Image (spheres, coloured by chain):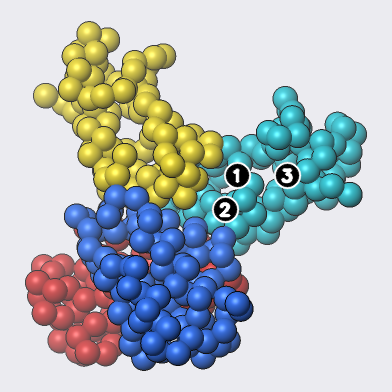
Chain colours: A red, B blue, C cyan, D yellow
Amino acid sequence: MNAQARLVDDEVRKGLEGLGGWRLAAGAIAREFRFASFVEAFGFLARVALVAESLRHHPELTSSYDRVTVRLTTHDAGGVTRLDLDLAARIDQLGDR
Amino acid sequence: MNAQARLVDDEVRKGLEGLGGWRLAAGAIAREFRFASFVEAFGFLARVALVAESLRHHPELTSSYDRVTVRLTTHDAGGVTRLDLDLAARIDQLGDR
Amino acid sequence: MNAQARLVDDEVRKGLEGLGGWRLAAGAIAREFRFASFVEAFGFLARVALVAESLRHHPELTSSYDRVTVRLTTHDAGGVTRLDLDLAARIDQLGDR
Amino acid sequence: MNAQARLVDDEVRKGLEGLGGWRLAAGAIAREFRFASFVEAFGFLARVALVAESLRHHPELTSSYDRVTVRLTTHDAGGVTRLDLDLAARIDQLGDR
């Protein structure tokens, strides 16, 4: 299966079942993470950046004090792909959240 | 002068005159920065995070591949303050943009 | 008490009693931290950097794959000060180690 | 040519000719970078970390206020390889130094 083929919404929702806190909206999956402080939030953001660069797949990241929102979509496919679900799972496994 | 007193829009616009690329919108000042790559964009984001933490004043940061948008407002004042203008100036002085 | 006055070795050792894993050597205190991966190690390094910049007191940091060594001394005092012990305590409180 | 085959010292020195400031010592190549501030030094360190993780090849990094030392070797080869020279070149191309 092509990791970069666009999934239909039912496939995305099925893929999200194993992940906590992600939602499907407007052709992307997104999750908000909260932390004890800006320092902890940035430590998370930095780890997400390293994972994203190593996969050559980059989320939209929004940081607002103790919150980080990660939004994933595959532009070339025009929607959510297996690659987005894989990156979401990798992000969920990052330490200390 | 209290660095955390809300400025009226004319004061903000006057303060932005010395800064390039910042705009006033919806009670905040914002600027978008573009970079050669995600790696360079993240290097900028990391430096902004250090400056923000050292001033105990945290912007809303949005990162999308080679672009970083910085949005500054002072929540306690309900709008833009001298502190936001000062942080904007500090961010503009960061290297390599 | 001046946070930047050099402590004698017995004072440093007493100060380290409440901290786990720090050792005194050659006019500095140091601790090695290990992580599950380079990504986790860098997330820690980033958080240490933010705390250090906000205190205007910067450790010597060595990163080698999954290990980060933090070494603290106060150059102006020529040895270990209360400021170093305080920063060590702040670093120990960072998440997920 | 295998990018991970150990190079003899003459090959390393020849490879370093095109790079400024790197030196060969004790089975590794190293370079020290200086910056205007700790903030700029950390911005560089963060970019090196992203490049390293994306290549799955991690330098030894030492940060001391405004200086960052990057040391590269390939443990599995017991010395310097083409991979180290390639990463050195990538690091030299990072912005704003």
Q: CA distance from mark 2 to mark 3?
A: 13 Å
Q: CA distance from mark 1 to mark 3?
A: 9 Å
> Disc 3 residue type?
Asp
Residue B31 left/right relative to A92: left
Secondary structure of the residue carrying tag 2 is: helix
- State yes or no: discs 2 and 1 in contact (Cβ < 8 Å): yes
Label 1: chain?
A: C
Q: Which residue is mark 1?
A: C58
- Quadrant housing the C terminus of chain B: bottom left
Q: Which dot, 2 or 3, sits closer to the camera?
A: 2
> Disc 1 residue type?
His
Q: Is residue D91 above or below residue B53?
A: above
The picture quadrant where one finds residue A57 is bottom left
Marker count (numbered)? 3
Q: Which residue is mark 3?
A: C84
Q: Which residue is mark 2?
A: C53
Neighbours of disc 1 within 10 Å: few (<14), some (14-19), many (20+): many
Label 2: chain?
A: C
Q: Is residue B81 above or below residue C46?
A: below
